[in-house]
Image (cartoon, rainbow, N blue to C red):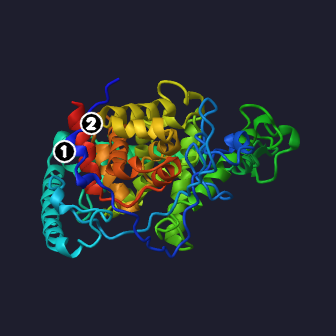
Amino acid sequence: MVNKRVPDWLNSSLWSSPGPQPSVQSTSSSPTPLNEDDDRSTRSATKSSTVTVNAIKAGSSASDGDFTVERPGSMTAAPAVIRAETRHVPTRAKAEIRDPLSSTNYHSDDENGSSASSTTTSASAAAAISSAEDISRQAQLCQELSRKIINMGEVRRLASQGIPDGAGIRATVWKLLLGYLPTEKALWPTELVKKRSQYKHFKEELLVNPSEITRKLEKSVILDDEGTVIEDKGALPRSEIPQGEHPLSLGKNSIWNQFFQDTEIIEQIDRDVKRTHPDLHFFSGDTPFAKSNQDSLRNILIIFAKLNPGIRYVQGMNEVLAPLFYVFRNDPNEENAASAEADTFFCFVELLSGFRDHFCQQLDNSVVGIRSTITKLSQFLKEHDEELWRHLEMTTKVNPQFYAFRWITLLLTQEFNFPDSLLIWDTLLSDPEGPLETLLRVCCAMLIIVRRRLLAGDFTSNLKLLQNYPSTNISHLLYVANKLRVKSV
């Protein structure tokens, strides 16, 4: 087979990744890394020196600080143990925006470690241009949102370039991109009232404790000698307690039996919610505000699990939920912010509808499962950079499952700091074909950006690099991803 020639644009020094940067120490503890589902833990308990694919269906573990990936049995056995923590990505200053078409303005630390002073002027100028572009894009988005009928094509085009934070419009734009709000603005109030009322009903029906139902039944009705109804607050006689409401009932329709079955999942949700972004006071801490936000995440995940018995809750869903709730809870519109829990629930359901098969273990090996999606990423890389693909998968034997499993299932929420993740999500949600294809392009771009380091590395160094992805310029990353879209057409 004749190897495809590597495109010239891939050999530009633009795509050379900076060398490792000194990490900024966070004042809070690092998030517990992704771990396996509880129901998968027994399969890997005896494989302490392996690297696991079935780890997580993407989540966190309170007891294990490592994320392990196990090579499939059909492959060559992995060498020594490779463990990479799902690290807390420290908050960084906003990345400098350089012209991605001009490689002369971009120097990696590896190539020109002393060039910082010589590029200060160009970096400052580029930052000023970027700021002007943000202001212009913000004004255009505000103008589009003020129309009676929203032009979704234009909103998607503008949002794909990143939604500026200043105007506080990201919440509204995301609701539009996820189909939660209709394009006709006059329908927004009616639609929001209906959805929020529906969510309130879900909470009343699905979050109730069976003991509360039993208490209601304790108000038995007694008639006196004259036939007058007397409400007796005493307990029901044991013989009159319906079987379905008896705490020891094992019936399928028993509310108590279902309650005990849900307890394990609810406990897992509680553990994961408490570990969601411990570096952000919004999610973590003992303040009433943080606890209120944790309660909202918990409610959403429990209701989702009960309404979707085929999937229920899988570790890692909390990480996918967090950006949505954060954005909606910080909506400058107080009424919308107060209803963030309800709005987040429906948008979470819509977002997960495109990825739900990745969380279903029974579908792992199907055409819609996570392994199939990872294979698409591998083929995508081979199509655009066969040299890098061959080095990773043939020479160093780094199977994409070892790193891409977490990238894909958690929508890159663990690979970048939180503000950068929101920018990436702007692009993911803006794709009219759905976020999956754009996600694969971004993942492929992540590989291309560090291709020089990967081509120079072996199995151990490459796996460590990809499981602890280095700090990078998000604007360049999204530029390369878009370049891949153009070359695929």
- For label 1, the residue is 157
Between residue 205 and residue 6, name the one nearer to us. 6
Between residue 358 and residue 52, name the one nearer to us. 52
Residue 390 in percent (x, y) is at 41, 35
| Residue in the picture at 82% in, 44% down | 225
Amino acid under label 2?
A: Pro
Q: Is residue 363 left or right of residue 1?
A: right
Q: For numbered disc 1, what is the local secondary structure? A: helix
Residue 240 in percent (x, y) is at 83, 38
- For label 2, the residue is 432
Amino acid under label 1?
A: Arg
Q: Are marks 2 and 1 in contact (CB under 8 Å)?
A: no
Mark 1 closeness class: few <14, some 14–19, many ≥20 residues within 10 Å: some
| Residue in the picture at 45% in, 46% down | 407
Residue 214 in percent (x, y) is at 74, 47
Between residue 7 and residue 42, name the one nearer to us. 7
Q: Which quadrant of the figure contains the N terminus?
A: top left
Classify residue 228 by image quadrant.
top right
C-alpha distance separating marks 2 and 1 = 10 Å
Residue 213, above or below 76: below
